[in-house]
Image: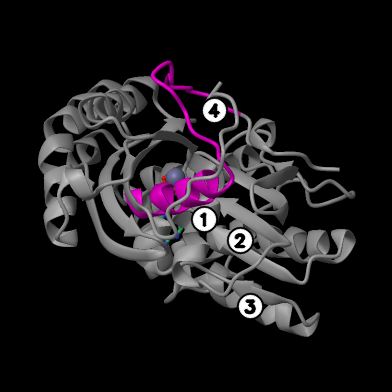
Amino acid sequence: MIYSQKQTPFKKEAPVILGIETSCDETSAAVLRGETLLSNVIASQAVHVQFGGVVPELASRAHLRKIVPLVDEALERARVTLDDVDAVAVTAGPGLVGALLVGVNYAKGLIIAQKKPLVGVHHLEGHIYSNFLSHPELEPPLLVLIVSGGHTMLVGMKDHLHYRTLGSTRDDAVGEAYDKVAKILGLGYPGGPVIDRLAQQGDPNFVTFPKGLEKGTTFDFSYSGLKTAVLNFVRSLDEATLKAHLADVCAAFQKAAIDILVEKTIRAARTFGFKTITVAGGVAANSYLRRALKDQAEQYHLQVFSPAMEFCMDNGAMIARAALERLRQGYVSNLELNAFPSLPLDELSVTYE
Ligand code: KG4
Ligand code: ZN
């Protein structure tokens, strides 16, 4: 279990929370005072670029090297010391187990030394709360579209800490599809930003790629067919044609990948009666997704919120912000906190009926 028994809510109005994130290939630390962000330091691991994807063992080692200086830098930029910190929050899962363990064990070390509360945070709960950093006026109920390298999910958030998964990917995540297609096209890692940029100059109707699970009423997603369709199409082109139409292939892939997200998100909002939609995760940085979702939502008088770019990628600030909500409701962890490579979001819900 992430949380030990429910405690009385944290008394301090605006606690200082140190947030630590090491679930994948970003090492990050942030300091939050109440809802005010004092610092957010993110170190992206460049070591994986040459391999075209994250190498778990290298990720753990890079986290180990960076965690101490990064936490120091976050405290320094926030102009606080460890003595000022009221609670330490850390991502406990899901993610790469070796990477998570670096953050969890470091956080445990800090709270033993400092005798402060520890709050284990679900990585996706962090992404959900990234929007509350950018839009403090936001209030549940919300429909959340989580789109990252590891997840593609529609989550109904009835109230703070109440989640119900309405749909999720049955195979690859959308960010993973971007990364794999970028690899096929020889565009390097991570694939999202470069495909996003190239697609802006391309013709999305150059070729029509299949959208996963388009038919029927499911809110689930599928991206492995799209990836294979791109691979087969690219193999059918000679080198010169591919070079001349690289931007077109990117635009056509992006259209198939994103349009289905937009369609299902709008349909889910209307089906379940949500008036407000938030988008979170690395792919929330995608310019086409941000624009298309806003345009579609307007037609149905739905509001859409996306986080600022620095809160789309994995970061410690979102972990600290989610922990603030946990502390407000009395959820703290203890020294038995472990790293959880897979961890269903719904299990954390207070209740959801
Ligand atoms: O949330 P995140 O930093 O890490 C995970 O929790 O997975 O997301 C990383 C993912 C990568 O797959 C990356 O290619 C994708 O987000 N990404 C994008 C964009 N920027 C990052 N995908 C599409 N368009 C972008 N602009
Ligand atoms: Zn993430």
**Seen in the image, is 89 located left or right of residue 347?**
left
Q: Position of residue 158 (x, y in %)?
A: 75, 54
Residue 120 lies in quadrant: top left
Q: How crowded is the residue under tag 1: few (<14 C-alpha within 10 Å), some, or many (20+)?
A: many
**Seen in the image, is 85 located left or right of residue 178?**
left
Among numbered discs 1 and 4, the one appearing first in the sequence? 4
Which residue is painted at 69% across and 52% down in the image?
210
| Label 2 secondary element | helix
Within 8 Å of ligand 1, the CB of disc 3? Answer: no
Which residue is painted at 68% across and 30% down in the image?
347
Which residue matches tag 4? 3
CA–CA distance in space, label 2 to label 3: 13 Å
The amino acid sitting under disc 2 is: Ile
Which residue matches tag 2? 258
The amino acid sitting under disc 1 is: Tyr
The amino acid sitting under disc 3 is: Lys
Q: Nearer the viewer, mark 1 or mark 4?
A: 4
| Label 3 secondary element | helix
| Residue furthest top in the image | 336
Q: Nearer the viewer, mark 2 or mark 3?
A: 3
State the extent of the magenta-drawn residues as a range. Answer: 316-343
Among numbered discs 3 and 4, the one appearing first in the sequence? 4
1 and 3 marks in contact (CB < 8 Å): no
Q: How crowded is the residue under tag 3: few (<14 C-alpha within 10 Å), some, or many (20+)?
A: some
3 and 4 marks in contact (CB < 8 Å): no
